[in-house]
Amino acid sequence: VISLHFLSSLQSNTEGGRNTAFGTWAGDSNTTGSNNTFIGYDADASAGGLTNSTAIGNGAIVDASNKVRIGNDSVIVIGGKVGWSNLSDIRTKKDIKDIGLGLNFITSLRPVEFKTKEGDDRIHLGFVAQDIEVLLGEDYSILGIGADTDRMLSLRYTDFIAPLVKAVQELRVQKEEEISILKDQIAKQQAQIVALQKQLESIIVILKE
C-alpha cells in the first residue's frame, strides 16, 4: 500500500498505508496507522496506530483516530469570516430523542477563567474537561478523549448549546407554573376580599338601623 511523503517524513512507518505527509519529520510517529494526513513541519500523531486522523500546521499533534488537529499549543486564534457549519441533516442521524440534560446539568457546571501554559498570557473563559467527565462520563461526544498515553481531554463547546436551550425551556415551564399558582392565589384572595366587603356592607346596614 502506497504512502505519499517527502524526505524525512513518515520515517517510522512500517505497515501503515494510504498516509500523506508533507514537511520535515511530518508523521514520524506513525508506524501502523493508515489513511492519515500530516501537513507541516513536525506535524504528527501522538500514537503510531491512528486511523483517519489529520494534523495540520507546525508541530500540530493529533491524538485520536478520526480527529483533525489544526495548529500547535501556541496558536491563540483559529477563525474565518463566517461561522463553522456542522452537518445536521436528519438523514445523518438515528435514535433521535429529547435530551435529558437541562437545568440541573447547567447549574452543576463550574465556569472558570484560566491562562494556558502555552501561548499568550491572556485570560480565557470556559470549563475543565475533567469536571465534565465527572458529570457525564465518557458516553457523550461533548468530551474528546485522546488515544495517547497522556489521555488528553478536550471539549466541544458547541455541544453545550442544546442543554442551555433545554434549561431555558425548563425555566419557562417552572415560571409558568409559578405564575399559574400565583394567579390562583390572587383569585382566591380577591374572592375573599369581595366576601369581606359584602359582610362589611351588611354590618354597616345593621348599624344604621
Image (cartoon, helix red, strand yellow):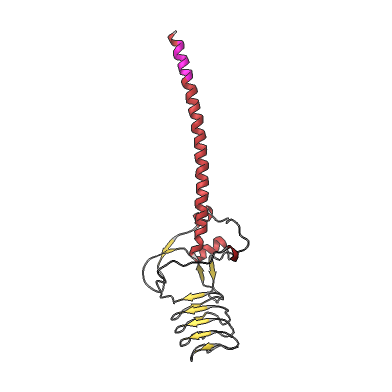
Q: Residue at x 63, y 61 (%)?
A: 95
Where does the image place residue 47, in percent across and percent down from the top left?
55, 80
Residue 97 in the figure: left or right of residue 62: right
The residue lying toward the viewer, choosing from 13 and 112, is 13
Q: Residue at x 43, y 75 (%)?
A: 73
Residue 88 lies in quadrant = bottom right
The residue lying toward the viewer, choosing from 2 and 100, is 2
Residue segment shown in magenta: 198-206
Residue 19 lies in quadrant = bottom right
Q: Residue at x 52, y 34 (%)?
A: 184
Where does the image place residue 158, in percent across and percent down from the top left?
49, 63
Q: How would you classify the magenta stretch by its main secondary structure?
A: helix
Where does the image place residue 31, in percent across and percent down from the top left?
57, 85
Residue 181 in the figure: left or right of residue 117: right
Q: Residue furthest bottom?
A: 7
The residue lying toward the viewer, choosing from 111 and 142, is 142
